[in-house]
Amino acid sequence: MAGLSVKMVFSAGFLLLMALSIDIWEWNEGGPDIAGMPYWVIWSMAIVIATGIYYILFSKYIWRDE
């Protein structure tokens, strides 16, 4: 039963990352830049890095040969 709860936590994490990848609060905004890049580029880079780390953890702990 513990395996099921861990899978549910990882599934919820992936759903959260997918929801965070849509930055609806910055639509139609032309705000300042950070290091010459708009906020949405930095946000996208952060989401991609977080998803990569999450995928590494997922493949190490959940998606292994049993």
Image: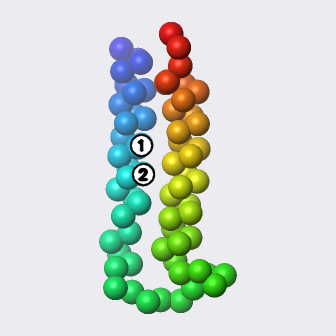
Q: Helix or strand or loop: what does disc 1 sit on?
A: helix
Binning the other alpha carbons within 10 Å of mark 1 as few (below 14), some (14 to 19) or many (20 upward) gives some
Q: Quick check: 12 left or right of 58?
A: left
Relative to 16, does residue 56 appear above or below in the rendering? Answer: above
Given the image, on which type of amino acid does mark 1 rest? Gly
Q: Give residue 45's quadrant in the image.
A: bottom right
Point 57% across, 34% down: residue? 57
Q: Nearer the viewer, residue 45 or 3?
A: 45
Q: Which residue is mark 2?
A: 17
Q: Give residue 20's quadrant in the image.
A: bottom left
Relative to 44, does residue 25 appear above or below in the rendering? Answer: below
Rounded to the nearest whole Å, what is the CA distance between mark 1 and mark 2? 6 Å
Q: Quadrant of the N terminus?
A: top left
Q: Position of residue 33 (x, y in %)?
A: 57, 85
Relative to 27, does residue 60 appear above or below in the rendering? Answer: above
Q: Position of residue 25 (x, y in %)?
A: 35, 75
The dot on residue 13 is 1
Q: Helix or strand or loop: what does disc 2 sit on?
A: helix
Point 44% across, 89% down: residue? 30
